[in-house]
């Protein structure tokens, strides 16, 4: 209340104290700040520019939506003031108003165009900031500001050509205004090729003439690079932008290096060849002492990996994995797995790389790394002898890396007979006996560092060796019986079952413990489940009210209520939705279905969504769509959700997704099944809406898909 009294005082000193107190003590969440609205309105109409400035500063600092709406008229009037001091404060206050109340933008567009004709740097800075904010909040206004684009070019050329000591910072004339002008040009040029062409020469001039020995010059160059990257600039300018970032990489300032690495990630997708020229320098930053620089360099290295440099890059990344900090090991190991899967030159190299990663990363690898390597080993039939010998040698020397020990235990259990044969052309064969193999496995079981999962793998491996070894059956029986009274329930259960196999079903043991068969693939390329008739947790969709989804369905041209979102409910396997009561396995019968090309439905800002199709011959009216979403950007996407809608003549069921996290650089993916029943064979249209969080920002996109292949609905 004392602040309110001081603000209402006619003395300038009292008003200044009151306004300063209000800015420090109040904010828009407190109703008390609304009490000063009338006083501020009087002060905005005051004849003294100093008092007007106090009110403008306070409004820009704590103005709420209601206060901004009430005082917007006075601010718009002061934007035409003859006093530069007032005009500078009013334009910044206008920026705050349109941020709080976007519907007032139209009020400020004419005056902002007038302000761009000002000559004073302070007012010009505010005018450029106001114009940029208007264009961001109201893209249609960009058309009006593009007419003033020649004026912006002229102003930037004037700033660069004339040195003004009054506005210079470290030898660079008004870098703050230069940066703001470049940002406005970037906004105006994002969707207009003529604007991009007009500013091409100027961007090249800024890039070559700006001083690089100070942070002020580097800030201007950095904004120039962002302008080139975010607009449809010529390829020559993009190469120039990469070269500027290359110079940043050689800077002694680690902050500038970090900025360069971050910016190169935005260019690597479109100008990979230009970024590749700086690969050696980028790899050097893996040995930098700053962890944040290491992280950015690591992300960029994975983005640079391709078929031609995979071997060289993997050596550097494996070396980094061995020495990096623990918080980077998981990211590095995951990136190595993904890169090896994408670009491996041979199957043996792929398996060797993953084994080396498991040896170095230890517990930092992803949970699915063990099963992934086991699947690779199982498919590489010609390398089984080499793999089992190498893994046996590794665990005989060190059992500290638990994921590697789990893979080794599985391989020894499956291919222990090949280990005894000692026939391997790739490496010098090991000569081991059955007892030596069992000694190693028993050592793993008894080690205090072995996890319950590792012991389970090892116990199963020992049991499997009972059908591969001939001389140590009694020893294997004793080991298994010991763990029948183990404190670990899972291990005890396995041991009891294995004991029963020895005692009651010994005649069936060779068949039960034979080698794992190759994984069968369905027509769609997915694994065929072994059992399909058991109750399981399925996902069924529920209809939402039409009023909630008209924004999603408006472009489909007809009213429908087929928008679905997956909701988990415990139900029996859904068969009644399929004609004739068939199960989902009916889709995978022996009759080959006609091949349908996949369809890319979204590819923007790193998010890539592809549909693959399956039409079972037994039910031509049914279409099964598998959506696969990946994230090729540099940051993770969390809480990913997708909704779908179709016309009412088509029935749609959207099943639950496989997850909600899309890792950066394509690490991991989310699959989701969409079942469509189209008995009338109408042309298929679909409206998709997906939402996710990235870098703290919520993103929601909508896309209409109408280019489905004819084979999906005819």
Image: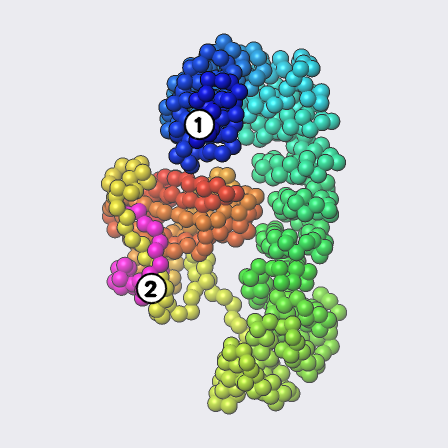
* Marker disc for residue 217: none
Kindly identify which residue carries mark 2: 570
- At label 2, counting other C-alpha atoms closer than 10 Å, the crowd grade (few under 14, some 14-19, many 20 or more) is few
* Residue 684 in sight from this viewpoint: no
The residue at the point 55 percent across, 47 percent down is 664
* Residues drawn in magenta: 561-587
Asked whether disc 1 touches disc 2, contact meaning CB atoms under 8 Å apart, the reply is no
The residue at the point 52 percent across, 81 percent down is 492
Q: Nearer the viewer, residue 99 or 434?
A: 99
The x and y percentages for residue 194 are 51, 20
Left or right: 312 in relation to 479: right
The residue at the point 55 percent across, 19 percent down is 125
Left or right: 451 in relation to 52: right
Compared with residue 12, is residue 396 higher up or lower down, i.e. above or below?
Answer: below
The x and y percentages for residue 233 are 57, 26
Kindly identify which residue carries mark 1: 4
């Amino acid at each position: 209340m004392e602040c309110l009294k001081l603000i209402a005082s006619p003395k300038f000193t009292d008003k200044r104290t009151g306004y300063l107190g209000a800015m420090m003590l109040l904010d828009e969440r407190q109703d008390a700040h609304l009490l000063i609205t009338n006083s501020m309105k009087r002060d905005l109409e005051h004849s003294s520019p100093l008092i007007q400035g106090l009110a403008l500063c306070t409004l820009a600092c704590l103005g709420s939506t209601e206060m901004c709406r009430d005082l917007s008229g006075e601010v718009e009037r002061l934007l035409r003031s003859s006093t530069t001091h007032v005009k500078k404060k009013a334009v910044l206050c206008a920026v705050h108003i349109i941020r709080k109340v976007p519907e007032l933008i139209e009020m400020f567009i004419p005056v902002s165009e007038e302000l761009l004709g000002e000559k004073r740097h302070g007012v010009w800075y505010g005018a450029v900031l106001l114009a940029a904010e208007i264009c961001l909040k109201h893209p249609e206004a960009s058309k009006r500001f593009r007419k003033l684009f020649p004026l912006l070019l002229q102003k930037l050329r004037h700033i660069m050509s004339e040195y003004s000591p009054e506005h210079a910072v470290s030898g660079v004339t008004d870098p703050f205004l230069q940066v703001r002008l470049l940002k406005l040009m970037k906004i105006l040029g994002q969707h207009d090729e003529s604007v991009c062409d007009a500013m091409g020469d100027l961007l090249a001039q800024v890039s070559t003439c700006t001083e690089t020995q100070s942070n002020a010059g580097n800030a201007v160059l950095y904004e120039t690079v962002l302008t080139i990257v975010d607009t449809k600039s010529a390829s020559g300018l993009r190469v120039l932008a990469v070269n500027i970032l290359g110079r940043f990489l050689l800077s002694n300032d680690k902050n500038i290096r970090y900025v360069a690495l971050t910016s190169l990630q935005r260019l690597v997708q479109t100008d990979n060849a230009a970024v590749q020229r700086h690969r050696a320098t980028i790899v050097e930053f893996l040995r930098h002492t700053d962890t944040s620089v290491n992280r950015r360099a690591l992300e960029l290295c994975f983005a640079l990996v391709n078929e031609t440099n995979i071997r060289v890059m993997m050596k550097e990344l494996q070396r980094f994995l061995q020495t990096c900090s623990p918080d980077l090991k998981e990211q590095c190991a995951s990136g190595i797995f993904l890169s090896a899967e994408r670009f491996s030159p041979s199957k043996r190299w792929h398996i060797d790389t993953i084994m080396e990663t498991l040896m170095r990363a230890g517990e930092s690898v992803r949970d699915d790394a063990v099963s992934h390597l086991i699947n690779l080993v199982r498919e590489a039939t010609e390398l089984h002898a080499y793999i089992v010998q190498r893994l046996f040698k590794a665990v005989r020397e060190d059992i500290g890396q638990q994921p590697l020990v789990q893979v080794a235990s599985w391989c020894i259990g499956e291919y222990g007979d090949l280990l005894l044969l000692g026939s391997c052309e790739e490496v010098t064969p090991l000569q081991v006996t059955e007892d030596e193999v069992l000694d190693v496995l028993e050592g793993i079981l008894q080690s205090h560092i072995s996890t319950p999962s590792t012991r389970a793998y090892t116990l199963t491996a020992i049991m499997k060796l009972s059908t591969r070894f001939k001389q140590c059956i009694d020893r294997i029986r004793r080991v298994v019986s010991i763990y029948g009274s183990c404190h670990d329930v899972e291990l005890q259960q396995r041991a009891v079952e294995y004991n029963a196999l020895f005692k009651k079903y010994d005649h069936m043991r060779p068949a039960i413990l034979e080698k794992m068969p190759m994984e069968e693939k369905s027509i769609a390329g997915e694994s065929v489940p072994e059992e399909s008739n058991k109750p399981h947790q399925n996902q069924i969709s529920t209809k939402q009210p039409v009023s909630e989804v008209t924004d999603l369905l408006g472009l489909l041209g007809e009213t429908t209520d087929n928008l679905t979102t997956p909701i988990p409910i415990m139900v029996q396997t859904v068969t009644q939705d399929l004609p004739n009561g068939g199960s989902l396995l009916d889709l995978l019968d022996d009759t080959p279905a006609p091949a349908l090309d996949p369809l890319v439905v979204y590819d923007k800002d790193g998010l890539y969504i592809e549909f693959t199709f399956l039409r079972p011959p037994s039910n031509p009216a049914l279409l099964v769509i598998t959506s696969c979403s990946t994230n090729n950007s540099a940051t993770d996407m969390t809480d990913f959700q997708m909704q779908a809608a179709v016309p009412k003549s088509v029935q749609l069921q959207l099943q639950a997704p496989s997850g909600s996290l899309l890792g950066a650089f394509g690490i991991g993916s989310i699959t989701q099944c969409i079942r469509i029943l189209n008995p009338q064979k109408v042309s298929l249209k679909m409206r998709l809406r997906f939402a996710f969080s990235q870098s703290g920002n919520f993103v929601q996109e909508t896309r209409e898909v109408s280019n489905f292949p004819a084979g999906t609905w005819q």
